[in-house]
Image (cartoon, rainbow, N blue to C red):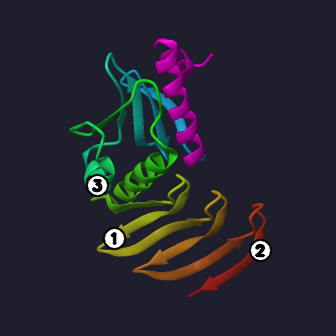
């Protein structure tokens, strides 16, 4: 039994069943995520970034996607009790997959909107948690090494940019990772 199984098993059977359902549904929605315990709660991360945590409490279970997600979900939160960054749900059953899908989509949009960072780091994720693209910005323009990925997580293309323009050698890859095409830019 892993740490997450142990954390979930610490709750009464029916409540643990609801938390297991949440775990299964979130892992299905985010197949590229990694799981860990953050603040003692089962959590999912995409490319090291926290997407959502969840846990059980005496009167309810909760999802912890952050306050921006609640704002993005708007009317979908009707019927749920919320606190800053937390959404409460029934101790005995997981939220519907449609709700969890909307929550994940809202969180990924929030993560994507947080880039580029002040340092210039850029990352964009697909709504399934796979990396879509990564690189850097300098003075508002793409610069340095960039990578672009398919929705399944496989590398599609990589190369370098200078002031937003392709330079040097760019390689396009097949879905199985083999180099398919190489183009050289001045």
Q: Which residues are the magenta region?
A: 1-29
Q: Secondary structure at mark 3?
A: helix
Tell me what residue is drawn at x 25 percent, y 45 percent: 67
Q: Residues within 10 Å of mark 3 (few under 14, many from 20)?
A: few
Q: CA distance from mark 3 to mark 1?
A: 38 Å
- Neighbour tally class for label 2: few under 14, some 14-19, many 20 plus, Cα within 10 Å: few
CA separation in Å, label 2 and label 1: 30 Å
Say which residue label 2 marks: 180
Q: Secondary structure at mark 1?
A: strand
Q: Earlier in the sequence, mark 3 or mark 2?
A: 3
Q: Main secondary structure of the magenta part?
A: helix
In the image shown, does 64 or 176 lie closer to the viewer? 64
Among all residues in the image, which is located at the extreme bottom? 186
Q: Which residue is mark 1?
A: 138
- Quadrant of the rendered image containing residue 34: top right
Q: Residue furthest left?
A: 84
What x and y, as percent, mark residue 74? Answer: 27, 55
Q: Quadrant of the N terminus?
A: top right
Mark 1, Cα crowd under 10 Å, few <14 / some 14-19 / many 20+, is some
Pair 3/1: label in front? 3
Of labels 3 and 1, earlier in sequence is 3
Q: Is residue 27 magenta?
A: yes
Which residue: 56% across, 65% down?
A: 147
Q: Which of the two residues, 122 or 81, is positioned nearer the viewer here?
A: 81
Q: Which residue is mark 3?
A: 75
**Magenta highlight on residue 180:** no
Say which quarter of the image contains residue 159.
bottom right
Position in image of residue 99 (x %, y %): 43, 48
């Amino acid at each position: 039994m892993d740490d997450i199984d142990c954390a979930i098993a610490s709750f009464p059977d029916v409540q643990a069943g609801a938390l297991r359902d949440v775990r299964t549904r979130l892992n299905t929605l985010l197949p590229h995520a990694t799981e860990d315990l953050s603040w003692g709660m089962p959590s999912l991360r995409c490319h090291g970034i926290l997407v959502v945590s969840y846990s059980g409490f005496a009167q309810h279970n909760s999802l912890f996607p952050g306050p921006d997600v609640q704002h993005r979900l708007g009317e979908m939160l009707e019927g749920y009790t919320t606190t800053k960054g937390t959404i409460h749900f029934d101790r005995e059953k997981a939220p519907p997959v449609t709700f969890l899908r909307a929550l994940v989509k809202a969180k990924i949009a929030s993560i994507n909107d947080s880039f580029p960072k002040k340092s210039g780091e850029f990352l964009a994720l697909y709504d399934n948690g796979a990396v879509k693209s990564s690189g850097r910005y300098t003075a508002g323009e793409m610069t340095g090494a960039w990578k672009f990925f398919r929705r399944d997580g496989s590398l599609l293309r990589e190369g370098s940019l200078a002031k937003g323009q392709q330079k040097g050698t760019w390689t396009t890859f097949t879905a199985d990772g083999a180099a398919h095409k190489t183009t050289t830019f001045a």
